[in-house]
Amino acid sequence: MSYDRSKNFHECAVPGCGVRISSKLLMCLAHWKRVPMRIRLNVSKSYRVSAGDYMVARQAAIDSVTPKTISPSAPSASAQPGQIIKSSATTRATGNLFQGGTQNAEGRN
């Protein structure tokens, strides 16, 4: 009987990444480093406690590193539907993409 090493690997959980990682990990190191520390800790703690809590924490980790896109109904004249928006300091501080003047799709004035 031979040992199949391919069963010990899967793809990073971030959509579109495709990096093969150990089945013991949620995502590749590049994405895991981008997950905020409080979410990382929650993923680790919930994995040992409850499957339901783990799935919620897992999704929060994935959402924290997945690029946000503009919906077709977003009120921005300068951005196209589906275009990736990079948040600015104003957006992170206030939660308002349009505060402080008109911003382009990259979040710059």
Image (cartoon, helix red, strand yellow):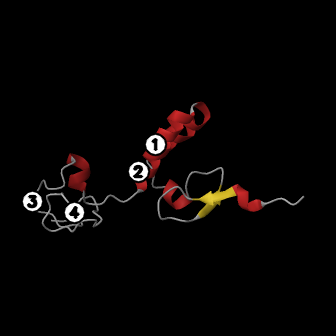
Question: Residue 52, position in %: x, y?
Answer: 52, 34
Specify which label sits upstream in the sequence, 2 or 1. 1
Asked if residue 1 lies left or right of residue 84, the reply is right
Q: Mark 4 — residue?
A: 107
Q: Secondary structure at mark 1?
A: helix
Q: Mark 1 — residue?
A: 39
Q: Which tag is nearer the camera, tag 2 or tag 1?
A: 2
Q: Are marks 3 and 2 in contact (CB under 8 Å)?
A: no
Q: Residue at x 58, y 38 (%)?
A: 47
Tell me the CA gap for discs 4 and 2: 20 Å
Q: Secondary structure at mark 4?
A: loop
- How dense is the environment of label 4, judged by Cα within 10 Å: few (below 14), some, or many (20 and up)? some
Q: Are marks 4 and 2 in contact (CB under 8 Å)?
A: no
- How dense is the environment of label 1, judged by Cα within 10 Å: few (below 14), some, or many (20 and up)? some
Q: Mark 2 — residue?
A: 63
Under mark 3, the amino acid is Gly
18 or 107, nearer to the observer: 18
Q: Which tag is nearer the camera, tag 4 or tag 2?
A: 2
Q: Secondary structure at mark 2?
A: helix
Specify which label sits upstream in the sequence, 1 or 4. 1
Extreme residue toward the left, this view: 101
